[in-house]
Amino acid sequence: MLRRKLASYSTAMALILGIFSLAAFAAPMAAQAAPDWNLVWSDEFNGNSLNTANWTAEIGTGSGGWGNNELEYYTDRQENLAVTGGNLVITARNEAYGGMNYTSARIKTQGKKSFTYGKIEASIKLPTGQGLWPAFWTLGESIAGEGWPACGEIDIMERVNFDDHSNGYIHWWADGQADYGTVSGYIDFSQFHTYSIEWDANAIKWFVDGVQFLEANIKNGVNGTEEFHRPQFLLLNLAVGGQWPGNPNGSTPFPAQMLVDYVRVYQDGGTVITDPENPDPEPSPFATPNLAPGKAIFASSLETPEFPATLANDVNAETRWSSALSDNQWIYVDLGKDYMVNGARLLWEDAYATNYRIDVATANPQSEASWNTVYSNANGHGGTESIPIDAVPARYVRMYGISRATQYGFSLYEFEVYGGEIFNVPATFNATKWTAKSPEIENDTLNGKDFVGYLIDGSYLDYYINVPQAGAYNITLNASVGLAGERNVALYSGTTQVGTLPIAVNGSDWFNFQPNSGSFTLPAGLQKLRLVVNNSVNIENITIEPAIVLPPEPDSLTVTSSANELQIHINTSAPAGSRFWCYVLKDGKVQYNSGSWSTGKDYSPALTQAENYQVRVYRLDANGTMTVITNQ
């Protein structure tokens, strides 16, 4: 998207045919063994902000509208660039900003992550509309010295306007600008799709959802393609207007969003291309988010004031904390509340620990007795060390360095802590807040709603809940189903199944979320709640509340009434955090149920005073105590 197509596609194709011949690019290659693709780098966008160790957000309008007469002003504002719900979200808006009438975002890995050869892919959902131009592409690192197109460009995915296909192209220098490419088959752009290239010393191949639609021969730099044998960095952006799509109009939907679930790079054999002085960390093996960034962090000592503890959780692998030049030094993160911690990752500088441990605590980190060791390593190797931990509740997580590999102190570029939330019942929480899941599941966002999709037969989600007392609880799944057939979700407390919840079919709409409730008996205390699906379901929210059981001998309640209507006024001095339910009964049967609320309230149900009604109010205090008040 640097230039974009200074010549039209028809002119570019004529250039290819007239000067180089199409056969020079698409000629069949000799049979070769399938590559052994190993993941060497990825960004799964599972945090809550852009990882600046991977990406730089470009700002402004570039030169000549980024070389294409584009109409947007790129920003790094949350309104245009966000990481939420497991996705990178780039939003184009129709607004006056920076002298332009539109805003959007464009990010790049230039100077941070570059690759020569490999399989490069991303899962993306694209917007539709006149003047919209999303792209996933690469540029050569040599652009700073050679300029474009001599640096080379690979367009993995470009789409414009209402096109029902993706475009794959390369651009380079061969005694003038050279372009080669074509379009994919039909794509349903209302869904996520995987856009990828497979690139080696012989060819570049383009795919959508694993189906190849283009191949370019680059063997031995044929036709001046030397550019494609040197490192390339990655870009993602959503342009508005420009030479190719033209301007937006009144039908263009704003705000328009480009959602990116992940970007991944694989290489044959898994050799990572790195800067020897700043090695790239391995991709995180933990599905849960890194909880440490921005949290309070403390250390036993500093080598000098220029290496404070805060540099170890700033999401910047080029800044570091370093301790005093002695053994038995520590650094710990205060997560602000208890989480279920299931992993840690240490990105060491050359001064690493040969012997260290990971400790956790839930209170009073100043007391050594509060810390519990969950991992020990007497053979630390430095570099990037990923440490799985059996899920444990913790507010404070500490790296305690016992002995050093060098004469210097302990030195960490990043101290990452991974885990998920603990939900105190009663609770309502978004289904995307899992602590573990089956591989097929994806977190999605649509119309401002975050939800979990692709829950096929056998898929599961894990959550940690803290139940105040053993008993019956109503569990509600706000779910959607767009296909006919029986659906249910089996619920487990730990390894014990507590029941099965049927899920209603919503016709053909996968995004019409409706409540599905059932009563289940849960034990007291902290426990893992697992949901196992028997068929395709999307889930938005999960609610867990105490089930109301009518007691045989209720207490008393004062009720006022008029001549024609029963009027209920609840007066209470209940403690903060209490919840209430109001029931009106006749002959022992419930005639009216208010639902639950958190403050006192008046009710006037459509019931006449002439009947003999009983009114009951149930109050659940924050400590789990149930109180019943009645008018008898």
Image (cartoon, rainbow, N blue to C red):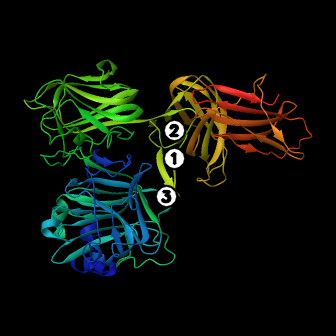
Are the residues tagged 2 and 3 within 8 Å (C-beta)? no
Count of numbered marks:
3
Residue at 55 percent across and 35 percent down: it is: 532
The residue pinned by badge 3 equals 191
Q: Amino acid at mark 1?
A: Tyr
Can residue 547 be seen in the rendering of this structure? no
Rate crowding at label 2 as few (under 14), some (14 to 19) or many (20 or more) other CA atoms within 10 Å.
many
Q: Amino acid at mark 3?
A: Gln
Q: Amino acid at mark 2?
A: Ser
| Front position in the image: 276 or 46 | 46
Q: Secondary structure at mark 1?
A: strand
Residue sitting at the far right: 610
| Front position in the image: 488 or 338 | 338
Query: Gap between marks 1 and 3, in whole Å?
Result: 12 Å
| Front position in the image: 225 or 625 | 625
Looking at the image, is mark 2 or mark 1 earlier in the sequence? 1
Rate crowding at label 1 as few (under 14), some (14 to 19) or many (20 or more) other CA atoms within 10 Å.
some
Query: Gap between marks 2 and 3, in whole Å?
Result: 20 Å
Expressed as whole percent of the image width and height from the top left, the position of residue 161 reads 44, 73
Residue sitting at the far top: 369
The residue pinned by badge 2 equals 459
Residue at 41 percent across and 33 percent down: it is: 337
Among the 4 quarters of the image, the one containing residue 414: top left
Residue at 44 percent across and 65 percent down: it is: 185
Among the 4 quarters of the image, the one containing residue 544: top right
Expressed as whole percent of the image width and height from the top left, the position of residue 549 reads 72, 27
Q: Secondary structure at mark 3?
A: loop
| Front position in the image: 217 or 509 | 509
Are the residues tagged 2 and 1 within 8 Å (C-beta)? yes
The residue pinned by badge 1 equals 454
Rate crowding at label 3 as few (under 14), some (14 to 19) or many (20 or more) other CA atoms within 10 Å.
few
